[in-house]
Amino acid sequence: MVGSAVCRALKAKGYTNILGKTSKELDLRNQQGVYDFVNQERPDIIVDAAARVGGILANNDNPYSFLMENLQIQNNLIDAAHKFEVKKFIFLGSSCIYPKFAPQPLKEEYLLTDSLEPTNEWYAIAKIAGVKACQAIRKQYGKDFVSLMPTNLYGPHDNFDLKSSHVLPAMIRKFHEAKENNNAPVELWGSGTPMREFLHVDDLAQAVLFTVENVLPEYLYNVGTGTDVTIKELAETIQNIVGHRGEIVWDTTKPDGTPRKLMDSSKMLSLGWKPNISLNGGIEMTYDWFINNQRLIFS
């Protein structure tokens, strides 16, 4: 999802010399494979949009995989970029790097000030390691390595698998299938009270493009909209866009996750980037993409 959005943004701006590899073409967990690729191609810039990602269920059920595979992916790319003199490295992380009960909105300086959310700490620890690796390279070698921490992302090419997806695409699929099944009830996890911020992936891609074209003075930047909604409000918005007319059932025996995750993106906004896609408009576009790409999604 993120890689394809970044490629769209670069191409729309006129960039033509873009190197992209799918996970089938290049296994980023393989250190020698990554070294050989970067050594051969000698890119000027690397955007690390690769990760093993998922929602609460996937994180909770696969802690070792989420920790180790993400460490392997990012360590191989960061070290190859350093070893083969890549001029700029852009590391993409997640708002889950911040403590579970950090003050809201989340500021970059809250990193490592308290304990993490237990349901996704394995992924968070890996991403924190990537942030600190890029910071260490800046400190020791003065290189232009920068980390962007987006809030919850959604958009075209999202993961709609109910066992591994994040909340927004999972809701789109659940409400769509329930609508097709005579408006059957939709069961959702938790209480619906946690608050979440959502950013369309094309807005993140514009932040990446901004970072490609500018030297950012600090090592870590939040990338978000600055507004959030409850999970209940999100569910009702998606239900309305999809056209589902059935009941929503909340399973309060399931975990809610972090109570709130609103990011303070003022540092990035002050440099000149800003999001342009509203949540309603973004969900409408994502649902249209979901409808028009059923074969791709379920292949």
Image (cartoon, rainbow, N blue to C red):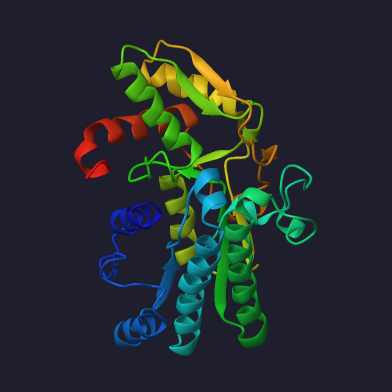
Count the labels in the image: 0
x 29%, y 70%: residue = 19
Residue at (29% x, 68% y) in the render: 21
The image shows residue 14, relative to residue 183, as above or below, that is below
Most foreground residue, 78 or 24: 24
Please give the name of the residue rendered at 37% of the width and 31% of the height, measured from the top-left corner. 173
Residue 92 picture location, percent across and down? 51, 61
Q: Position of residue 142 (x, y in %)?
A: 61, 83
Q: Residue furthest left?
A: 295
Against 160, residue 146 (above or below) is below
- Taking the spot 62% from the left edge, 70% from the top edge, the residue there is 129
Which quarter shows the C terminus?
top left
Q: Is residue 155 left or right of residue 117?
A: left
Where does residue 287 sit, x and y in percent of width and height?
A: 34, 30
Image coordinates for residue 162, horizontal then vertical, percent: 41, 38
| Front one among 249 and 242 | 249
